[in-house]
Amino acid sequence: MEEKHKLEQAIEILNTAKHTVAFTGAGISVESGIPPFRGPGGLWSKYDPIILDLDYYKRYSNKSWPVIKKLFFDFFGSAIPNDAHLDLAKMEQEGSLIEIITQNIDNLHQEAGSKKVYEFHGNSQKFVCMDCGSIILRNELVLTEESPHCLKTKCNGLLKPDFIFFGEGIPADAYEASIQAAKNADVFILIGTTGEIMPASQIPFLAKQNGAKIIEINITESSFTSQITDVFLKGKATDVLNKIITKLVS
């Protein structure tokens, strides 16, 4: 009964909202077959995070690239949007969701049809040349076990997947857009995020400070739950969002 009451409370908040923003983490993509990085069974319990250290990649791309390729392109490349991604896209189309801030690099929000997506940690479907700065799309490249290099004439610089490595800053445009979205939001939906990764974890606090109601969807409580969450909905993102979307006023 308590969970049903919480769901009704969340739907009431969403139905009266003027500017709803979703903030998504690894948990929303788990049901698409993408494991989280941290925690039991997370990627960093099986692989050395040094593969994503920027300096290490520059010096030893021949060692780190084959692992990056395996994880982010061979394995993750087959992932498709799940119902949670599709529900958020539908909410945007119907006007009940304005923007998405995501910590994920998997491009699944865009593949589901979402248009306003701020990628806090970048996107795996683009590469950037570390010499000339050119952006090259994933589908322009044939990925092998050899480190990828720039396609531009007379460059041939080392290409890096255009997501954040350790030692890099957050993309300025995504950071600024996320800050503004947090300030504008009157409802902020946290979905599948633990709140452990800085500086992304500060964005929901900014929304709360600016008066937003915080709805959290997660299989377990997070560091946000006791500090800023107004309504905690326990469960898989797909299950909870499927229930919510059927009762939203479009």
Image (cartoon, rainbow, N blue to C red):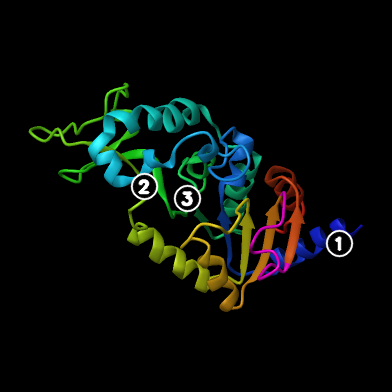
Mark 2 burial class by Cα count in 10 Å: few <14, some 14-19, many 20+? many
| Residue found at the very far left of the displayed protein | 154
> Which residue was labeled with disc 2?
165
Point out the tag, 3 or 2, that comes first from the N-terminus.
3
The residue closer to the viewer here, 247 or 210, is: 210
Q: Residues within 10 Å of mark 3 (few under 14, many from 20)?
A: some
Q: Which residues are magenta?
A: 219-230
Front of the two marks 2 and 1: 2
Membership of 60 in magenta stretch: no
Residue 222 painted magenta: yes
Q: Quadrant of the N terminus?
A: bottom right
Q: CA distance from mark 3 to mark 1?
A: 32 Å
| Between 99 and 157, the one nearer to me in the picture | 157
Left of 22 or right of it: where is 247? Answer: right
Q: What is the number of the mark on residue 5?
A: 1
Which residue is the site of mark 3? 115
Q: Is residue 197 left or right of residue 154?
A: right
Please state which amino acid type lies under the numbered disc 1.
His
Above/below status of 147 relative to 181: above
Amino acid marked by disc 2: Phe
Dividing the picture into quarters, in which one does residue 138 lie? top left
Give the quarter of the figure containing the C terminus.
Answer: bottom right
Image-quadrant location for residue 21: bottom right
Query: If you read the primary sequence from the N terminus, does the residue marked by circle 2 or circle 1 appear first?
Result: 1
